[in-house]
Image (cartoon, rainbow, N blue to C red):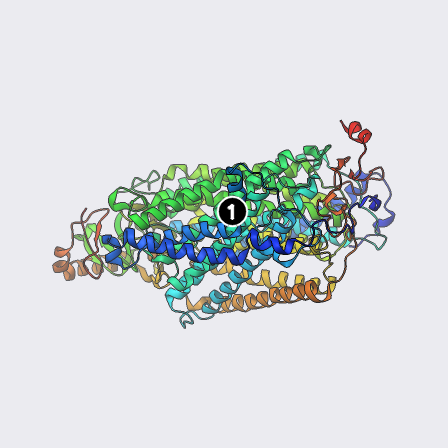
Amino acid sequence: MAIDMSQSTGVGQSGGAGGSSAARWFARGNIFTATLFGAGGWFFGHWWGNVIAGHYTSVQNSGTNDVSWLLGAIFAVVAWFIGLGALNHPIAKLWGGEAPMAEKKQKYSIMEYFSYSTDHKVVGIQYLFAMLMYFFVAGLLALGIRTELLSPTYHIWGPDTYIEIVGEHGTMMMMMMTSIIMGPFGNFLVPLMIGSKRMAFPRLEAASFWFTVPAFFFLLSALWQGGFQSGWTGYAPLSIQGGVGQDAYLFSFTLMALSMLAASTNMVATIINYRAPGMRWSRLSVLTWGMITTAFTMILSVPVLIDGLYVMGMDRAVQTSMLYGQHGGSPFLWENLFWFFGHPEVYLLALPGFAITTEILPVFARKPVFALKTSIAGMIGVATLSFFVWQHHLFNSGMNPDMRPLFMLSTELISIPTGFLYLVGMGTVWRGRLRFNVPMLFMLAVFFNFLWGGITGVYNSDVPVDALIHGSFFVMAHFHFTIMGQLMFAVFGAIYYYTPLFFGIKLSEKLGKIHFWTMFVAFNSTFLPLFIVGWLGQPRRVFEYAARLQTLNQWVSISAYVLGLSLAFFVVTFIWQLVVTRPKSEPNPWDSRGLEWQVGIPVPKDNFDRIPVILSSPYEYGNPNAGPMADLSPTVASVGSDA
Amino acid sequence: MALKTSEESGSPAAIARKHGSRIVAIWFILSLIIDLVVWFVWGPHMPPGDMTTTAAGQQFDFKVLTVMSVPVLLMVWVYGAYVIINFRDRGDHADGYYVKGNRKSQGLWYAATAVLVLFLAGFGTYELVVPAGAGVGEGPSPIWKPASTAHMLQVQVIAQQWRFTYRWPQFGGMETTSLVLPVNTEIQFNVTSLDVIHDFWAYQLGVKADANPEDNNVAYTKTQQTGRFVVRCDELCGIWHGAMYNYGNVVSQNAFYQWATNMEAQNASLTKLLPKYSTVYVPNDNVAGGQYFNG
Ligand SMILES: [Cu+2]
């Protein structure tokens, strides 16, 4: 534990920016001006769309005008960004000026968090709250689903409302999961971990966050526009049939896709170019590796989603007939485009979860990451193979049966790099001195939960067995184990672990353990029986099921309520400690060697007074000869010595 | 099981052997017991049963995968429990044993996972190809067919929002709303849709095939026991997706032919009004109740 705390430069530094900031935030734009502008944009676009398309036969026959809805949404988002002040800088540049970047501050006004901030620490916190908002709203919708399924025949919701809730839950969760690690933790931590004062593209970073806000509200708005029947997978021609709620689906998903592209472009550029001297690839933290791998996967797969959604929008608005049959299109086109994005997507949900688990595990095992290179190879292997498996969602579709053995093989091959992550985890705890703090409990749960998801993934990949379980609750349980059981447990562990850095407080161990144990037990109690439910023949997304499955379904619903209570307990205790009690944290409460913990609490406005010189790996726990990870006030000589 | 590891002495290899042999012993015994129970006690009762060859195949494959999964699950659990009990912080806030890799255990891991995965892929391919596509829809031109197609019963499944109807080309192209099948018979399902994508899932028959508009999705099975089965739509197809199910029966061959010839005679006047039997149809959106015609 040779952690030299004397290097914590910047602790308690007074804020640099002056009092004039209060005047400046309004001129710079904020969430209120943006909302105002956005509403104006909506009405303008909507009106214009009615002018253009109001007389189309399709519009007059169906009574819905998708053109005016989509134009309204596009103008709303453009105006929203103008209202945020996002264009101030580019326009100033076009006029030949060079507006300086807004100065970072040591202590932020609340308004900073509601503005187009280019400070990576502000963006991280904005993302954290926004993504949790997505998660809890979508979680409430899940309880709506479980309430309906308490009885096989008695209905709480009408069938249309039920399908709306199902689609809304799925889409909101899938959108959120893509960003819940890269958004809060990637943005906040990567510059600290690589020894940089800033991100490569702070404005792109700000844009990535501010796309997620209209995406949320547009998606939610589908609920009072008739919803969308197609679920998050949006299969055509069902998605062409629906009303304007379907436009809300495709438009909000597009905004989220743009957000992912912006965030990942910034992430790749930052990690490649902004590493401090001595930060060799071999010394890069696993979380940073996870971020760059995920970012590359996003950059390659997300454009396919945007194209697909664009095609869907055109088919709906102006009948381009690409996704339905009568005029030469094919529903198979959407299935392929969607899963060509969708399968890399589900792995790019899993990768950051594993990255953060591997990042936090050694701190509490008091040992180096076991087989570090293997863990990185595992992540790159998963990311690469994820582009070659998409047809395993389409084993029953009737498409090219001769390709099935190949897609079965490629899918099963993914268990080799996924297995690496278990090798790494199991090796890391071997003969460690495990400390069972709350973050560690969540990390161990990640391995427990993902094991169910990983093993049942092999069942799904096997074509004959998939014939039984495809489209059933078995599949649904499988991906809830890999996504909620793995990613969300990693996220909650990371929240407990990083709150000292984010907010200067250390959450109560006692409350955290109550949250952990209730969530862990309720989660497994909710989703394990669903494997059986699906195996016994209950398809997904149904509101009526066989009477013999009622007991299991009721068990699941009640467990889901307990899970909901556990998460509500987290919300209440988290906000209580954040706002009211604020239990102060020491600068490095977990005795971590990581560079991000050496800068002090609160994190100084520029992260580092001087660019540090990296001297060793962040994971040298138990090495009696290990010096500190970095020299935080390097002299010319120490810079030279590394080269 | 808890050891006094704080005063562990000896070479790292000796310590690893001591702990490792205990873990392996516990793991091996547990795996053996549970696998025997899975194979002999639970396996024969696993869904979806053995009403058809493909259902029996799915049952067998599920059993094999479970027998292979149990040791993997137990390896992580036994190892995890052992580590949590024995390698915890003992209040002295000391660091763990400094090791960053181990060539032997890593090599063993890579080899074992590779062998396992290649076996699974080989097994899955064999089980897909030999039973003629394992009951999965193979599209309009199937590549894995039953050995003898001489006495095969043809059944067309027409899905639409939100019901299934069935057409019988060998019985004058009649259309029925219920599905009755003869036992000990090879059956070819031709699955199609009149609107959006549905999925024909005859659970106890071990058959699953997407119903795509303007596409014929062929799946094979062979009935081997009589009994009742459920048909559910297994692809989200709109608001009444959850209500899109019905039931069918596998009956004796005599009972089937009696039923079918009866139905054919009963329905003859209606069958005349239907479009000619075809592998795909075009729906007529202007007529209520889901009419269709030949494209
Ligand atoms: Cu259907």
User: In the visual, does A78 lie left or right of A500?
Assistant: left
Residue A276 on image: x %, y %:
71, 35
In this view, the residue in front, A460 or B172, is A460
- The quadrant in which residue A395 appears is top left
Q: Which of A277 and A560 is in front in this view?
A: A277
Q: In which quarter of the image is the N terminus of chain A?
A: top right
How many numbered tags mark residues here? 1
Task: Please state which of residues B166 and A74 is positioned toward the viewer in this rendering.
Answer: A74
Q: Mark 1 = which residue?
A: A259
Image location of residue A568, percent across then percent down:
60, 66
Ligand 1's image quarter is: bottom left
Q: Can residue B142 be seen in this view?
A: yes
Query: How crowded is the residue under tag 1: few (<14 C-alpha within 10 Å), some, or many (20+)?
Result: many
Residue at 55% from the left image edge and 65% from the top image edge: A560
Is residue A252 shown left or right of residue A55? right
- Residue at point 48%, 37% (across, down): A388
Whether residue A458 is visible, yes or no, is no
- How far across and how far down the image is residue B87, in percent? 78, 50
| Quarter of image, res A439 | bottom right
The answer to whether residue A623 is above or below residue A174 is above
- In the picture, the quarter occupied by the C terminus of chain A is top right
Q: Does the closest atom of ligand 1 sit within 8 Å of the Cβ of label 1? A: no
Amino acid carrying label 1: it is Ser
| Callout 1 secondary element | helix
Q: Mark 1 lies on which chain?
A: A
Closer to the camera, A629 or B227?
Answer: A629
Instruction: Give residue A23's position: percent from left, percent from top.
Output: 62, 55
